Image (tube, helix red, strand yellow):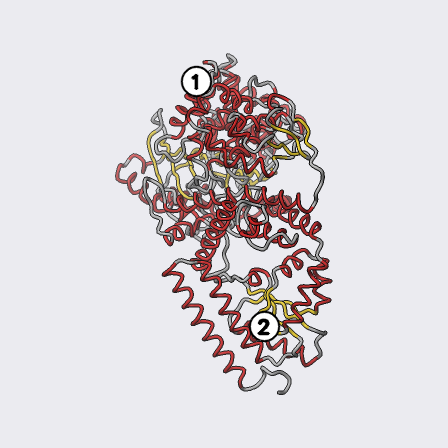
Amino acid sequence: MGQSALQDSSRDELRQRLKAQLKAEREALIDAFHRDGKPEKLLRGLRNCVDGILSIAWSAAGLPANTALVGVGGYGRGELFPYSDVDLLILLGQPADALTQARLESLVQLFWDLGLEIGHSIRTVDECLVESSADITVQTSLLEARLVTGDVLLFDELRRRHRAALDPQAFFQAKTAEMRLRHAKYEYTAFALEPNVKESPGALRDLQVIMWVAKAAGLAESWSQMARAKLITRAEARQLMEKEYAFKDIRVRLHLQTRRREDRLVFDVQTAIAKTFGLENRDGRRASEFLMQRYYWAAKVVTQMNTIMLQNIEAHLFPRPSAAVPIGGDFKEHFKEVNGFIDIAASDTFERAPSTVLGIFVAMTERPDLKGMTARTMRALWHARNVIDAGFRADPLNKALFLRILKAPSGLVHALRRMNDMGVLGRYLPAFRSITGQMQHDLFHVYTVDQHIMMVVRNLRRFTMPEHAHEYPFCSQLIANFRDRWLLYVAALFHDIAKGRGGDHSELGMQDAQAFCREHGLSEADTELVVFLVQQHLTMSTVAQKQDLSDPDVVQAFANVVKDERHLTALYLLTVADIRGTSPKVWNAWKAKLLEDLYKVTLRVLGGEPHSADRELRARQKEALATLRLYGLSATAHEALWQQLDVVYFLRHDASDIAWQTRALHDKVDNDKPVVKARLAPIGEGLQVAVYVKDQPDLFARICSYFERKNFSILDAKIHTTRHGYALDSFLVTEESFAGSYRDIISLIEHELCALLLAQEALPPPTRGRLSRLSRLSRTFPVTPMVDLRPDERGQFHVLSVAANDRPGLLYAIANVLTRYRINLHTAKIMTLGERVEDVFLIDGPALNNPRSQVQLETELLDALKI
């Protein structure tokens, strides 16, 4: 046969024949799935197809008799997703000699030549056991090993010895620890807007963990066997089979839709996947919403069953005496403590005393040392949630119990999350049930509405905890002196509860909050505060990020809305918690500073101190001069520059900015060459770049073009023109690499930007560039481009407002259009909210006095905003 049984003239013929067979069988199976929609049939069919192909290739390889081809991983479980790897173990009876090694290499190459994504290992039984003892992943894959072809006795030896070496207790501990790490990676939530159908909490992997540990413990190898072993009920077994089927169905469609091994249910494909299920847009909701809500409800069930079943299996593997201890408190006759868990006194506790459905959460807030609920308690509570009806909600006892949970000194967040997971919260607050698993169609929020609300409550709670005071010290300081802080939690529960109903969710949510407060006996003053917070929960963010905080009228108008310090403080705390609860990436130091500045200046106005421009100007100048003295500048060094600056400049810049720019420019007031200075931003994030140069029409566009080429994000821009015709512009920019090499980047910016301004070259054309993932997702959830151009209240300038999906170079594209129309830019307010930008510019220029030019300008701006 020569060096290898597959290295002769028949090799190419075999490869071509098997490749054609694989392609034909695979296409027929996928076509059948498109007709009948049966995922299990497709998974088994693909497995059988590959089994047959591999067996033919194996037979032709001429390997020794005491070898075997073994499927492991998902392929070993007997299922193969359309674009998944084929995980193989080539099992040897003895170490391979040179001839066998050559034939093995040729065989594996053939597998790859056939177009199979192979993951393989070549080991003896002894080597398998050594690897298994050192690696829990190998141990798990061998637990699911399946003989494809070859030596049956050798494979049986592997299974027997692997089983004998397996320690079920150690395996359980390793797999549950691995699961916890995986859940942490996905932030412990099944309700991310782009879940991983395989790996996210509540998804397929959680079901597999249950099966692995049950199999390792010798308890069961299927859901029906688990029911017979009394680990779950028959109804629960059916439910789990249904959820597993649903997840597999979605994963199959993901693979087929993307034509690759893709397990993330990302925005790009959600609508397409929904349509393959026959879902359509209706009642103002997208087809993808219906798909995702089904997914989240299934994930919620799996999450609950995962907890119950792992606890049952753990009790079997680690038996210990059930030491029941009275729970104490109001519910001692209904609950007891068993090995650190709360347990019901009888299997029908919740049915006999319905108020205990809320009472158990009250008891757990009063006993933070408890690890959770026993499996039988969780199961009983899950099935008893239907006792919560209109009569239950009207019962004064139950209203009091719910308020006790909200007022609990500890354990509130855990209680609300458990209540949500168990379906209790949605039953008690019907409006909350409608937003459970509801998507939010923007990339500003990365959680479903209910999970976002949970995050906001969590953030408010963290403000009260000393161990987290370093995270938001100002918030911790404010909430420490806030009376009845539990009212903030009520507002958090209702602030987004009306999303998805149509109309203004703040107004609709306000009505829900008002009804709740009245039904639960809150005082008129407390009700008014909660209703105010729900109605105005977006106001502070909007004012801080979109309006000019140096304008006394803006601050006074906001002060008129909040009316007093208590309302201001409550709104500030809720606003910070809300923004932080949308996405880990949305909050930044710049937004923190804007909100804190608005809080402090409004507080002064509410305290009776009018927001006087003169007083503010003098205070900032005094503070800046004190800083300049620390730098050793003479008492008159600032005068030459300050004589060229007007009131607007001093009101729009902090004292630290004024001192920094004055120090850099005091001896360069009439400089012929551009001056560019950069420093770490005082807010602790990004770089501050100041540009001082004789004014020129295309200056803003030229600077933006530089930042675009460097891939810098512009968080803020302050544009100012001195009395003698110089531009003094300041930019706050950020980029991921700043933290590690900011000194080099500062030097680079100062040198390159100065050279660019000196060169006076023609502006480069705006580039749409390669779309980032954010921009691609923006096509899925587009923001309709908006341009609004109108005169300001004083008739001196025009206010240009734009909104669009963010993309690299967008600000430069806008600036380029303004330059072509010779528009002068006086101020720029830059705001980015996830994928959405909302920028406001104060402008003037002759083109704005011509209606026809105005229309042309708006048309070109709209075109520039498009992705």
Q: Residue at the top extreme?
A: 608
Q: Mark 2 points at which residue?
A: 149
The number of numbered discs placed on residues in the rendered structure image is 2
Residue 699: which numbered mark, if any? none
- At label 1, which amino acid type do we have? Arg
x then y, percent, for residue 21? 46, 75
The residue at 47%/41% (across/down) is: 834
Q: Which of marks 2 and 1 is nearer the N terminus?
A: 2
Is residue 469 shown left or right of residue 77?
right
**Depth-wise, is mark 2 or mark 1 nearer the camera?**
2
Dot 1 crowding, Cα within 10 Å, few <14, some 14–19, many 20+: few
SS label for mark 1? helix
Q: Cβ–Cβ below 8 Å for labels 2 and 1?
A: no
x then y, percent, for residue 691? 53, 39
Q: Mark 1 points at which residue?
A: 518
SS label for mark 2? strand
- At label 2, which amino acid type do we have? Thr
Q: In this view, does 521 lie above or below 448?
A: above
x then y, percent, for residue 863? 34, 47
On-image quarter of the N terminus: bottom right
x then y, percent, for residue 358? 53, 27
Residue 305 seen from this side:
yes
Residue 556 seen from this side:
no
Q: Is residue 276 above or below residue 515?
A: below
Quadrant for residue 738, please give it: top right
Q: In this view, does 538 lie above or below 187?
A: above
> Which residue is nearer to you in this view: 528 or 229?
229
Tell me the CA gap for discs 2 and 1: 71 Å
Quadrant for residue 851, please give it: top left
